[in-house]
Amino acid sequence: MSVRDVTDLYEEFGDDRLPPGQRETSKFPVLSKSGTPAWDPETWEFRAWGAVDDERRWSWDEFTDLPSETQRQDFHCVTGWSRFDCEFTGLTFTRLADLVGVTEDATHVMFHGLDGYTTNLPLDDCMRDEVLFAWGFDGDDLPREHGGPLRVVTPHKYAYKGAKWVDGVEFLEEPERGYWEKRGYSNTADPWNEERYS
Ligand SMILES: Nc1nc2c(c(=O)[nH]1)N[C@H]1C(S)=C(S)[C@@H](COP(=O)(O)O)O[C@H]1N2
Ligand SMILES: [Mo]
């Protein structure tokens, strides 16, 4: 299986692969606001709505039949650890955007998780090859505590911009703030610029 290596992404943002103030770890800590929510593959649905031509719903089987790819990415947590060389498998954000037909009025995106988590990004920050709706990790199913069945990964941002247990993406015509963005974490979250707090 071919793997797209995007670990050189940092060159766009800074000189070092390890962003300032981060330490590298080979562990994969779990950070969740309220534990791992239950999910049922029979009733789970992924929904895309808002400023799109076609609001769409996919079942689990339908979603994971969409074209997928595997990428090698780095993962940067705002609390100070970075994990290099994570292999995530999933659907790119840009492919999903094509499927729903994002309108010209869409400027921002809100991701929604099964635990009630939300996180926001400008549309331009999502329309990048490395933003994935990932269901695979290191050749296996994405572990439940890391957001399985499905999570978003945003290697160009601190990891709170990647919603675990994601089951919805909302296209917005104006900015809104998500769970941590309302509670003092940076709205922009660029690790190479150390945008941790707002
Ligand atoms: N649905 C949901 N997504 C979430 C969170 C959460 O609490 N709920 N925590 C965020 C935070 S603060 C971080 S650092 C990463 C942690 O991902 P990990 O537990 O796989 O390390 O998930 C992000 N996505
Ligand atoms: Mo975090």
Image (cartoon, grey):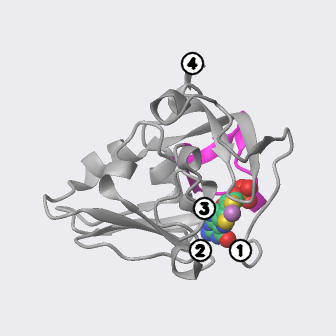
The Cα–Cα distance between marks 4 and 3, rounded to whole angstroms, is 34 Å
Residue at the spot 61% in from the left edge and 48% down from the top edge? 135
Residue 90 pos. (x, y %): 53, 42
The residue pinned by badge 3 equals 196
Q: Secondary structure at mark 2?
A: loop
Label 2 with label 3: CB-CB less than 8 Å = no
Q: Earlier in the sequence, mark 2 or mark 1?
A: 1
User: Real-space Cα distance between discs 2 and 3?
Assistant: 25 Å
Residue 138 horizontal/vertical position (percent): 73, 35
Q: Is residue 6 left or right of residue 146?
A: left
Instruction: Point out the frontmost of discs 1 and 3.
Output: 3
**Labelled disc at residue 103:** none
- Give the residue type at disc 4: Ser
Tell me what residue is drawn at x 84 percent, y 41 percent.
25
Mark 1: is the Cβ under 8 angstroms from ligand 1? no
Image x and y of residue 77, in percent: 69, 54
Quadrant of res 10 = top right
Disc 4 and disc 2: Cα gap in Å?
Answer: 31 Å
Q: CA distance from mark 2 to mark 1?
A: 8 Å
Count residues near mark 2 (Cα–Cα under 10 Å), then give few for <14, some for 14-19, many for 20+.
some
Residue in the picture at 59% in, 52% down: 194
Answer whether labels 2 and 1 touch (C-beta < 8 Å): yes
The kind of residue tagged 3 is Arg
Dot in front, 2 or 1: 2
Judge the density around disc 3: few (<14), some (14-19), many (≥20) Cα neighbours within 10 Å: some
Q: Secondary structure at mark 3?
A: loop
Q: Which residue is mark 2?
A: 114
Which of discs 4 and 3 lies nearer the camera? The answer is 3
